[in-house]
Amino acid sequence: MELPYRSYAEDCKRQFGSRLQKLSVHAGFTCPNRDGRCGTGGCTYCDNAAFNPSYCRRVHGIREQLEEGKRFHAWRYRKASKYVAYFQTYSNTYAPLDVLKARYEEALSVEGIEGLIVSTRPDCLPDETLRYLSELSRQCYLRVEIGIESCYDKTLRRINRGHDAACTYDAYRRAADYGLACGGHLMFGLPGESRAEMVAQAARLSGWPALDSLKLHQLQIIKNTVMARDYETDPSQFFFFTVEEYADLVADFLERLSPHIRIERLAGEVPPRFLAGPAFGLRSERVAERIVARMRERGTWQGRLYGAP
C-alpha cells in the first residue's frame, strides 16, 4: 500500500535499484560548540555515543570502520550490497579543506562505497567547503545533512546550539547556490516550544532552498548530558508525548509540509541504557507504523494542507 508521505528510502530504491545502506563513520572531527569557537559543552541534549553503532569507533581508521560495517550489514540484511559512508559523529565539515578531502576520499576508495552522506552544523559550511562538495557531488552520490533541530531562536538558545535560525537558513541558501540538495534534522518536544509552534515549522521549512529531505525525532533525554541534569532538577520543564500524541503531531506537521520534501525518518530511537527520561518503549519502525496508521485513519497525507492559511 502506498505510504501517505514521500519516502526517502523508496526514492533511493528507485534510483539505485536496491536498498542503499548507510555505514556510519567516526572520522575524528569535533564541534565548534565543544572546542570553544562558539561555545563549550555542546548542545544540551547531545551524546554521540547514544546513536553510534558498535563498529563506528575512532580507534579504527575510516577504511576499517567501513569494512566492518559492510560485514555487519551484509549479515543483518543479507542482501545489502550498495553502501554509502555516513560521516555522522559531530560536525563533519569542521576542519580545513585538505583534511576533509583526505578523509572523504579515503572513504570513497573502499570497494562498494557509492557515495557519502556528510552530517554537519549550519555554521560549519564555508563557501570553499560547499564548492568542493558541489564538485564531489558530480562524481558520486553525495548528500549534506544539516542539524536544524528547531526554527526558533528561543529554543536554539535554550539548548545551547551556538547559532541562530538565520544561520541555518543561510546555510541552505548558500548550499542551493552551489547546486547541493540537503537533508535536515528536526526535533519535536524541545523545552519551551508549544505544539502549535512545532507544527508551524512545516510551512517555514517548506520554503527553504536546497532542503529536500527531513529526519524527524522526538525528544529523548540522554544520560550524562546537560539536559539530563536539567530534567532531574526540574522535570516540569519537559513534556513527553505518548505514541498516540506523537502520531497526531507528526500527521499535523506532514499535512502542512511541501509534498516535495522526502521523509527519511519519522521517529528517533536511543538504546535504553542511554535513556534518562520517559520513552515510547517501541522500536522506531513500530512508531512509524503507528504514524502511518493514524494518517490513514484520518484520511490525510503529506502536503494535504500545504499552502493553506
Image (tube, rainbow, N blue to C red):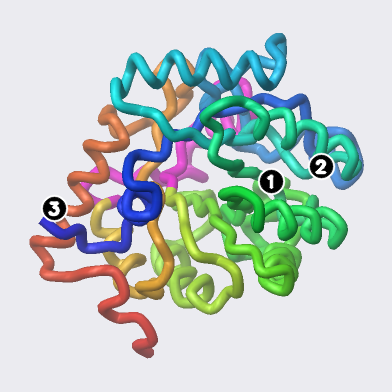
**What kind of residue is marked 1?**
Thr
Residue 209 in the image: above or below residue 214: below
Residue 95: quarter of image:
top right
Identify the residue position indicated by label 1 in the image: 120
Taking the spot 30% from the left edge, 26% from the top edge, the residue there is: 79
Q: Residues within 10 Å of mark 2 (few under 14, many from 20)?
A: many
Residue for badge 2: 94
What crowding class fits label 1: few (fewer than 14 Cα within 10 Å), some (14-19), or many (20 or more)? many
Task: State which quadrant residue 31 falls in.
Answer: top right
Rate crowding at label 3 as few (under 14), some (14 to 19) or many (20 or more) other CA atoms within 10 Å.
some
Q: Position of residue 267 (x, y in %)?
A: 36, 44
* Picture disc at residue 173: none
Point 58% across, 21% down: residue: 66
Percent from the top left, x then y, of residue 109? Answer: 67, 29
Q: Tell me the tag on residue 293.
A: 3
**Which of disc 1 and disc 3 is earlier in sequence?**
1
Q: Are marks 3 and 2 in contact (CB under 8 Å)?
A: no
Do residues under tags 3 and 1 come within 8 Å of each other at their CB atoms? Answer: no
The local secondary structure at tag 2 comes to loop
